[in-house]
Image (cartoon, coloured by chain):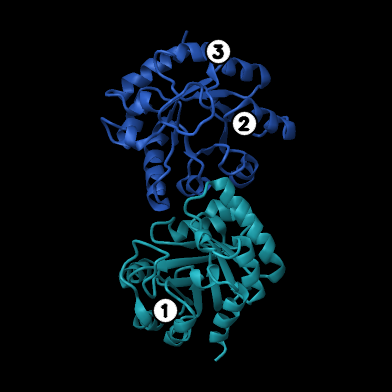
Chain colours: A cyan, B blue
Amino acid sequence: MANKKPITGVYLVTDRPLCLHHSLAEVVRLSALGGVSFVQLREKETDSRQFLELAKHLKNILTPFSIPLLINDRLDICLAAGADGVHLGQSDLPWREARRILGNDALIGLSLETKEDYHSLIQTHPNPELDYLAVSPVFDTSTKTNTKPAWGLTGVTWLKTQTNLPIVAIGGVNESNAEAIVEAGADSLAVVSAICSAKDPKLATENLTKKFQY
Amino acid sequence: MANKKPITGVYLVTDRPLCLHHSLAEVVRLSALGGVSFVQLREKETDSRQFLELAKHLKNILTPFSIPLLINDRLDICLAAGADGVHLGQSDLPWREARRILGNDALIGLSLETKEDYHSLIQTHPNPELDYLAVSPVFDTSTKTNTKPAWGLTGVTWLKTQTNLPIVAIGGVNESNAEAIVEAGADSLAVVSAICSAKDPKLATENLTKKFQY
């Protein structure tokens, strides 16, 4: 897994209904101009054909910036679109299947909802072939339902002491709490509405990116 | 695409809510005992993890019978479960992407909802690398919504005159109309409720299989 971009900086997770002022593609383009590090395309209700078209479109936008595109859950969309990897939740395909199918060059991240998720991961695979672990949710949020209790800042710090893998914090991340989450140990901040719903997604991304430059 | 099983006989398409008298796995096992030729796992509301578990379970049931398992839409589930191929609808991933990703040994079938679907397929690919074309729906049905007007028997016969690819008829197929659909030109009959909802799925499969022995 050499030559991969370090997991740091702002990580945009898309949500089309939350794109209030611009199209999804424009939000992604503006966030790229603002210095976003990673983009994850998350689509839960779309048919496969449209999902693929969106993925290809975003990949075309991001390639000139050398910004990796990850796909939420769907390995097949990743393969068909030539995306850079997948983000997996606890009810998505197992990460080992994803690694087997996508190969070592793919970026693969896994959401942990609880400390038990981490323990059961490490119990079977002390050195999992993952590119990052996502603390999900770090704070309660309205953009994802049915999640377990939030990890909080202490949860981020706890996970940081447990693993050498990069930690992505997701859920309720915004400009006001970003610095505290980074200080707690997060390597990257995943945001949804803070960029998708921003009037100026470029500025929103720039402001979040600054939290890594203290 | 050598050494593939000919597309003929009864093709079970699963629908868990329609499995009224047995579990899905038991329906599949009984249909295998009854002589089913192909099984397609169709899941529209299930998360990826559960979809994969179901696919693996059905694959284990079918392997001793040498009955191929196809997955509806989801190439990633097919790859992860070691299934034999995919069935694609018009809003699923494009079949050429599926062929590229799954390789020549995979069974890949495509649903055609209208004559226009066929014309646009052939216009770009006079000899598409597909294993079958599905006439969908041959008759109106309650198990699939939002489909275009039914092809009818004349539609089956029309498609048979157009292509050398095997034709699978799906939609409203049951014991009473099966023979007429085969006579109209179908190489295989795809059924959902006629087997899933049968009190005796083995007998239902046997009775449908007989329609190919006239």
Can you tell which quarter of the image residue A201 is in? bottom right
| Label 2 with label 3: CB-CB less than 8 Å | no
Residue annotated with mark 3 = B184
Above or below, comparing residue A183 to residue A77 in the picture: below
Circle 1 chain? A
Image quadrant assignment for residue B109: top right
**Chain for numbered disc 3:** B
Q: Position of residue A164 (x, y in %)?
A: 46, 80
* Residue B135 makes an appearance in the image: yes
Q: Position of residue A123 (x, y in %)?
A: 34, 69
Determine the residue positioned at 57% across, 15% down: B185
Nearest to the observer: residue B141 or residue A56: B141
* Dot in front, 1 or 2: 1
Circle 3 crowding by C-alpha within 10 Å: few under 14, some 14–19, many from 20: some
- Disc marking residue A163: 1
Residue in the picture at 32% in, 24% down:
B201
Amino acid type indicated by mark 1: Thr
Q: How many numbered tags mark residues here? A: 3
The first of marks 2 and 3 along the sequence is: 2
Dot 3 amino acid type? Ala
SS label for mark 1: loop
Q: Which residue is mark 2?
A: B2
> SS at mark 3?
helix
